[in-house]
Image (cartoon, rainbow, N blue to C red):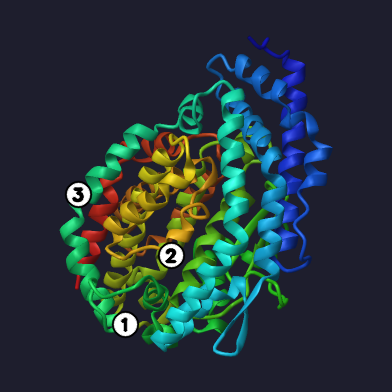
Amino acid sequence: MAEPLQQREIDELSADADRFIAELDEESYLHFAGHKETYDLSPIYERHERLTQLDTALGLGASVDGDRRRRELWRFACEGYLGNFVREEAERVAELEATLTTTVDDEEIPYRMLRPRLMNEDDRGVRERTEAARNELTEEHLNALELQAAQVVQRETQRLGAPSYAELYRNFGFGLDDLAEQCRRLLAETEGLWEETGDRFFRSRVGLGLGDVARWDVGRAWRGVAWDSAFPADRMLPALEGTLADLGIELRAQQNVELDLEERPSKDPRAFCSPIEVPGRVVLVLKPQGGPNDWRALFHEAGHTEHFAHTNASLSPEERRLGDNAVTEGWAMLLEYLTTDPVWLERRLDFPRPHEFAAEGAVQLLWVVRRYCAKLLYELEFHAAEDPTALRPRYVELLGDATKVKPAASDYLGDIDGGFYASAYLRAWAFEAQLRAYLRERFGNAWFSQREAGSLLRELWAEGQKPTADELLADVTGEKLELAAVGDRIREALAAV
């Protein structure tokens, strides 16, 4: 039985965790923004060795005693302990993703550009061959590393005192079982709605019904080529700046926010946020491509950026950097879904047929929420299985049932979010839906144009990750966080057409 740590030791570990996360985030920024091909995690882990030791994790676990900050630090130490064992696999996977290429129809394509290629390619045969090439690279180069990492995590979790990875997170306070039950209900209650609206969506976007769509068609449908002219690349950043200005935020005047706009060959094409110092240095990285999907990604990451940039610097590292990730994902989604809001579209872009586009966005939201419901159910089974490879067909079954599109079996390892992050996304969708309804009721349908709404957001952003999404929502609206609210949000958008 581990002995509780002294308060002095806990304070030292908290300060060290702050530096550890900052270094990890900076390394992630440098690699994925294309500044360097390698992804060098090992030196960072070595500099913060004590945070990743078993005795530290066990000692923090014995010190929790109902204190949330200690529990968050305990979770971080456990994740660091597990991450230390698989850092080499993570480095190698990232490096392979950055350097692997494949040839499709005599054209050499980098691995990270295969998914964008699937979105942008109009020829269905080329899409199918591109997807086949992606699966082949995944199977040949990545899955052995992913499997090795999964087996190591399974083994080392037991040394942390939990019989399984899922049980470890239940010990951290994750309400996985209640959320899983909400997922089952949402899947059942929206089954017919998805079959009807999903079929109509895919027919309008790629000319195929839900029964005929293959996975290599989905990205193309998501791309929304017909709407490209309304979402040009050169208007992305001005639209974001204008939206934030309406809320009382001058993006380029924020001294703690950096915009990385430079072109680099290995730069990830999708926008992302690196909160290297919270709130001192937050980097928003973008490589504007244009199109509705790219706009959604930018606004999502801008939501993270503003949340972290407005976090109160006096909060503890646990309250600034750790905590409930459904909070920051909820803020990201609140800005992201402006790009499918009819009132915002008319105000910011003079948009044609905004309600039609909003309805299509609601169908896409229904797809992704149903998919994540199935992902959480799959991950709970995966982390309880003795042999991870036995879950390969279960992945295809669960996600195929939810989306009605057969997924690639080769993704059964890579499509797992560490730390049950899928649960954070699911709860964030509920948080966003309920908070958005409150903002509309209080400030009107154009709430995003009101300085008072911006003041409220800044006040809430300042709380960082101190409250959970449940607590934040209850404090602002008096409501309980419910996944069913996402279904209500979707039905409202569909009914407006």
Q: Is mark 3 on a helix, strand or loop?
A: helix
Q: Is residue 130 above or below residue 487?
A: below
Mark sitting on residue 206: 1
Which one is in front in this view, the residue at disc 2 or the one at disc 3? Answer: 3
In the image: residue 104, left or right of residue 478: right
Q: Is mark 1 on a helix, strand or loop?
A: helix
Residue 45 x, y percent position in the rendering: 77, 40
Residue type at numbered disc 1 = Val
Residue type at numbered disc 2 = Ser
Residue 330 x, y percent position in the rendering: 45, 50
Label 2 sits on residue? 449
Label 3 sits on residue? 188
**Quarter-wise, where is residue 494 in the image?**
bottom left
Which one is in front in this view, the residue at disc 1 or the one at disc 2? Answer: 1
- The quadrant of the rendering that contains the N terminus is top right
Residue 181 x, y percent position in the rendering: 28, 37
- Asked if the residue under mark 2 is in contact with the one under mark 1, i.e. CB atoms within 8 Å, the reply is no
- Please tell me which residue is depicted at 43% across the width and 57% down the height of the picture: 334
Residue type at numbered disc 3 = Ala
Q: Is residue 315 visible?
A: no
